[in-house]
Image (cartoon, grey):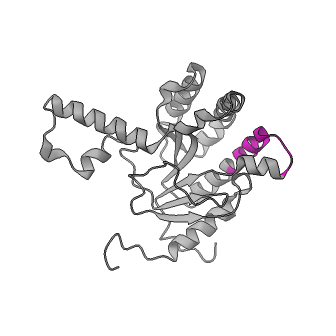
Amino acid sequence: MNEMDMTQIPRHIAIIMDGNGRWAQKHKLPRSAGHQQGVEAIRDVIKMASQLKVRVLTLYAFSTENWKRPEEEVSFLMKLLVEYLKKEIEELHKQNVIIRTIGDLSAFPLRVQREIEKAKEKTAANNGLIMNIALNYGSRNEIGRALKTIAEKYKEQIISSEDFTDEIIGAYLDTKGLPDPDLLIRTSGEKRISNFLLWQIAYAELYFTDVLWPDFRGEDLIKAIVDYQLRQRRFGGLG
């Protein structure tokens, strides 16, 4: 904390929460235990991000590719998401957290969709940290959906070809209204983007750590931010 410049806190931090399965394997536990322990990391990181006045925290919780996992694991993840929202919503509301989601929720069971909507409605009037959960999310899918909508607007002559700008595409992405990520963190030592926010992270700083997600805590978030603050962001210029 002593090394941190509180005037240079990233507005938007995105995290690929990776390593639950390896954490479970390391501790000779079922994969479900890794996912459960990962919830503890979410709780601690949200608390720290709120304390540091981060504006947006986007968490990659379930990707469009995660449906390829065994049905038993997918069912457990759905159950865990519902339990998390039911158990944590009052505390998140007390912390003034706003819950948003990106991704196509229509593929989820109705009970899961209802719980997500309840959490979003309850926290809609808050003005603290935006907890942006990526659920059934894939960046290529998101961009494809946005372009399809734009094409329909063009066909209906609501927009013209001159309107096809970066801004208009951004306005039809799931993250519309949010600043692009300043910092992208991936845990577990893997160095891939994995179809996450491909449009939005064009100029984000990337931070990779060997820490498995269930072991990631507020102190690790601080380390990532300090590393971010040591970099010079040029955005294609000379700085």
The residue that appears at 26% across and 50% down in the rendered structure is 167
Nearest to the observer: residue 165 or residue 190: 190
Q: Is residue 174 magenta?
A: no
**Outermost residue toward the bottom?**
238
Placement of 229 over or under 200, stated as above or below: below
**Outermost residue toward the right?**
28
**Outermost residue toward the top?**
110
Q: Main secondary structure of the magenta part?
A: helix
Quadrant location of residue 203?
A: bottom left
- Horizontally, residue 197 falls left or right of residue 38, namely left
Location of residue 134 in the rendering, given as x and y in whole percent from the top left corner: 52, 41
Q: Is residue 37 magenta?
A: yes
The residue that appears at 35% across and 79% down in the rendered structure is 239
Placement of 198 over or under 82, stated as above or below: below
The residue that appears at 50% across and 62% down in the rendered structure is 183
Location of residue 119 in the rendering, given as x and y in whole percent from the top left corner: 56, 32
Q: Is any atom of residue 174 visible in this view?
A: no
Q: Is any atom of residue 217 visible in this view?
A: yes
The residue range painted magenta reads 27-41
Quadrant location of residue 67?
A: top right
